[in-house]
Each structure stands twice: as structure tokens, then as C-alpha cells.
Image (spheres, rainbow, N blue to C red):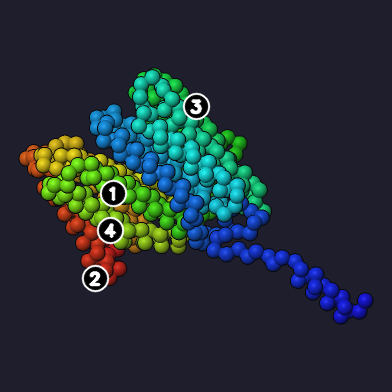
Amino acid sequence: MSEQAKQEAEAIAEAGKPAPKAETDGVPAPATLLRNHEGGHAPVSYLELFFDLVYVFAVTQLSHHVLHHMGTAGLAEALVLFLAVWWAWMFTAWAANWTNPERGPVRIMLLLSMLASLGLAVAMPRAFDAGGGGDAMLFAACYCLVQIGRSGFVAWAMAKSRQEHWRGSGARNMIRITLWFVASAPLWLAGALVDAPLVRLGLWALALTVDYGGPFMGFAVPGMGRSQPEDWDISGSHLAERCALFIIIALGEGVVVTGTSFAQETADLARSLAFVLAFAGSALMWWIYFDLGAERGARHIAQHAQPGRVARSVYTYLHMPIVGGIVITAVADALLLDAPLAAAKLPLVATQAGGLLVFLAGTGLFKRPSSPHGNFPLSHWVGGGLLIVLAALTLAFPLPAPVFVGATVLALLVVAVWEWASYHHHGSALAEDQG
């Protein structure tokens, strides 16, 4: 065969082969279960948005628990439930950052995690009932299933990767994480089996201490060492977007609670005013977080040399008070709509002023690392001070509930306008210093 004939035959054979699939925008070739974002942008998938719907329900359940258990024990129980819900969601967000939701096994993992999370949310209202009933066991078992099953899957997916980094240190890191969740599981299950709610609270708090202590200890395991910063190679922009979406979930839950409470009674003038105030508070919290903080934080983590370190501190931990504050103020909205003409008493003052204080503290700490000088926003100091003064005055000289809530909304407005004016009208440099 002539050389020309050989070349023609090779060209025909090559034309018959399927074209290789390119890796684009964080979507890897089918040979791996992992994303290939290499620290760049990884788009949030529709499945992740679908997964988050369960946590809309979970946050609603949490608000109802606080509303119906306003004592010290009830608030401690709500804190334990919130920390468990946040940790289950957050580690799933990390898992979706590493894995590719377009692959079948990853989709099945996320859907099964979604089902277990739904079971967790369903069990929340009666998770602390006396007697060690089925709801407590359902809550504990679903939490353990989500954490252990998802982390074990990601460890397996990384071990199958063709990239040495994921097959080596990445897989070992996920094995360590899985073992830490295995270590806390007996405490969760033992707490579900005991009859006394206070003992259950103590055991579950101890289990959370183990779970939350893992990152601080580098998930150290005897014989396996501890995690290093380079083990947390993530898409910073993806995690920033996921956390921003959870803020939307929490704010949306407040809108649902407000709308449901308003729809259950006659829409008279007092209740209509309370409804408007509740909505205004939610809108201003959205403004304070998203107008400046979300964009600046996303840019900060995307440009950081170690996005995993920023994600652990700024997003994994510092977003907890932001979400918690939104949940608490949703309870205040329900209290206001339930008695719009009553005097503002301790439950309303504590949930409205306290919730907004927690929210402002969380957003201020979140914005601080992305500030050039590491400043806590002065506007948040001023807003927090106004809230403390309003709470003290109202407890000493009871104000009508709408007047008190309206005053706290004005305090939020001061923070929002301050940031807007400094950032948008006096330049970004001044906003970084005074925002």
C-alpha cells in the first residue's frame, strides 16, 4: 500500500471515532465523578437547588420550635437542632463543590441525602419529646446517615480519580472526615434512646462538639495524620454562591411564616401594618447582606491563595449567626402578627432585637475579612447600639409592639443607607473603611 493510501485509510478511521468531550466550565469528562474546576468557577447545579428545598422546610420547622418553646430549655434545644441542620447542609455543599452533579452516582448520592435530610426535618418538632420516641431516633439516624454516607461516597469518588491529588491526599482527607462522623454517631444514637430530654440534650450537644471540633483538629486520626490547607481545594465562588442561596432560604422562610400568619386572620389595619413591618425587616436584611457583603465576599474567596481556609472560617462558621439571626427574627414576625396591638413584651423584644443583633454581628464578621483593613463595619456597630438601646427602653417603658418593631426596622434602615451612601456615592475605598 502506498504512503498516500495509508494516510487516507488512517484519516477515514480517525473520522469514525467519536470526538472527545471537552471539559468546560467545571464539568469534567465522563471518566471521573469529580468536578474539574481547578479552583475556578463551578456552576451551581439544578439538583443542588432542588436539594435546598428540603432545608426551606427544615428552617421552617426550626422557627416553629422556637415559637412554641420560648423557655431556656426550648432555646437550647433549638440551638442544637439548628447546629445539626447547618452542619448537614454545609458539608453537603462542600461535597457538591468537589463532585459532579451531572454524573449518575453523584445524583443518587445527593437525592438519598435529600431524603435523609427530609426525615431529619420531619422529626425536628418532637425530637426532644420525653420517652426516647421514634422521632428522636429518626432525627439522629437521618443526621448520621447524611454525614457518614455522603462523606464516605466522596472519599470513594476521590479514590477512583485519575488525579494523584484527589486519589491521594483528597481521599485520605475525606476518610478522616467520615471517621470523625462515625465517632460522633454513638452519641447521637444514645441520646435518641434515653428518656430524659435534658440528658438527650447533653449527649447531642457533646456529639456536636465532636462534629464541630473536627475542622479545628484537622480531622486528626491516629495513623492517618491530619488535614492540611492544600487538601481543601475548592471552587470559592461556588461555595460563596451556595451560602448566599442559603441566606435566601432563611429569608424566604421568614416570608412564608409572615404570609401564613397574616393569611390566617382578618386583614385589619393593625395586622396590615404588622405585615408591612415584617416584610420591611426581611427586605432590609436582604439589602444589608447582598448589596455589599455577598459580592465582596465572593470576590475575596475567589481571589484568595487558599480558598479552603477562607471557606472554613468565613462561610462555614461565620454564616451561622447570619442564618440564626434571620430565623430568630422570623419568630418575632409571627409574634407581632399574632398580637399586633399588644405591648411589646420580653419574647418579642428578645426575638426581634436579639435576632437582629445576631444578624448584624454575623454580617459584620463576614464582611470584615474582605475589608482591606480588616475593619468590623462601623454601620453595624451603630445599628447594634441602636437595637440595644431600643430593647432596654422598651423593657423599662413598654411600647406598643408595632412601634417597637418599627423602631428596630428604622435601625436596620440606618445600617443599609449608611452602607449604600458610603459605598455607592463616596467610592469603594471609603466604603471599605467606613462601611
Q: Earlier in the sequence, mark 1 or mark 2?
A: 1
Q: Give me the C-alpha separation between circle 3 and circle 4.
A: 42 Å
- Where residue 152 sits: x, y (%)? 57, 40
Q: Earlier in the sequence, mark 3 or mark 1?
A: 3
Q: Which residue is mark 2?
A: 425
**Residue at the image point whose x is 19% and y is 36% from the top:** 347
- Where residue 145 sits: x, y (%)? 51, 35
The answer to whether one can see residue 326 in this image is no
Front-most of residues 3 and 341: 341
Tag 1, which secondary structure?
helix
Tag 3, which secondary structure?
helix
Q: Which of label 4 and label 2 is nearer to you? A: 4
Front-most of residues 67 and 382: 67
Residue extending furthest front?
266
Q: Give me the C-alpha separation between circle 1 and circle 2.
A: 31 Å
| Relative horizontal placement of residue 299, taking residue 3 as reference (left or right) | left
